[in-house]
Image (cartoon, grey):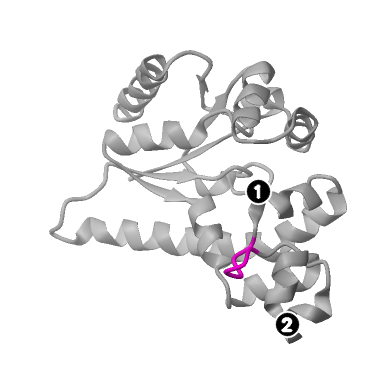
Amino acid sequence: MLVIGITGGIACGKSTAAKMFAQLGGEVIDADRIAHKLIKPGTAIWQRVVDEFGTRKSAVHRTPFRAASEGILNKNLSINRRRLGRIVFADQRKRKKLERIIHPRVIEVIEEAVTRIKKQQSAPSPEPSAIIIDVPLLIEANLVSMVDKLVVVVASRKNQIKRLRRSGLAEVEAIRRIDSQMSLRKKEKLADYVIRNDADLEETMKQVRKIWEDMNKL
C-alpha cells in the first residue's frame, strides 16, 4: 500500500487535492484536523498553548472567561486560531515555539494512523488503495521519509494572496504567512509529482487522476 504525502504552500489547495485522491480510493490522514482535536479546550496541549500565548497567563488559571475576552480564547474557551495566527506569524520565534508544542504529537498520531490502516490489509473489510497524508509542513517537519511518493500542490502568489484575502486576512497578513513558509520552488524540487492549482476544479481533478493512475501502475 502506497503512502502518499501531500503538501504545498498556504492557500494552494492541497486539502482540495487530498479530497480528490480520497474520491479515487485513498484514505486521508489530515494533519490540520488532528491538530484541531489536540487543542480542544481542556487538553494538555490546549493548556500549554494558552499558557504560552494567552495575553494574561496567570488569569487563565483563575478566571478563564476573563482571559477569553482578553487573549487568544473564544468565549467557549476554544482557541481563536485567527488571533493566534496573528501572533505567531508576526514573530518567527513564537511560530517555532507553537510548532514545538503541537507538531510532535501530531506526528505521533499520524504514525499511529498509518500503522492502523496498514494492519487493515489483513482484515476482510474493504481496503483503501493508498494512504494520503495531508500535511502543510510535511517537508519542514522532516516527514518525507514517511511517504513513498510526495505530491506538492502549487499556485501563483497572486492566487495565494487572493484566496487568503477571501478568508478574511488583510493583504499584509496574507503576504506574511506566505513568506513564512519554504518557497514553492524549493518544494517542487523535492516532489515526485506537482499539481498546479490555478485553474478550475475540473483541471485540478484531471491532474489528480493522472497522478493516481500513474501511481497505481507501480
Q: Is residue 108 above or below residue 184?
A: below
Query: In the depicted view, which residue is nearer to us: 87 or 116?
Result: 87
Q: Quadrant of the C terminus?
A: top left
Q: Position of residue 11 (x, y in %)?
A: 59, 31
Q: Quadrant of the N terminus?
A: top left
Instruction: Give the residue at x 41% y 57%.
Output: 114
Per the image, the residue denoted by label 2 is 63
Q: What residue type is disc 2 on?
A: Thr
Per the image, the residue denoted by label 1 is 142
Q: What residue type is disc 1 on?
A: Asn
Q: Given the current orientation, which residue lies at the most extreme left position?
A: 124
Q: Given the current orientation, which residue lies at the most extreme bottom position?
A: 62
| Quadrant of the image occupied by residue 177 | top right
**Residue 150 seen in the figure:** no
Q: CA distance from mark 1 to mark 2?
A: 39 Å
Instruction: Give the residue at x 69% y 22%.
Output: 185
The boundaries of the magenta stretch are: 74-79
Is residue 32 rendered to the left or right of residue 87? Answer: left
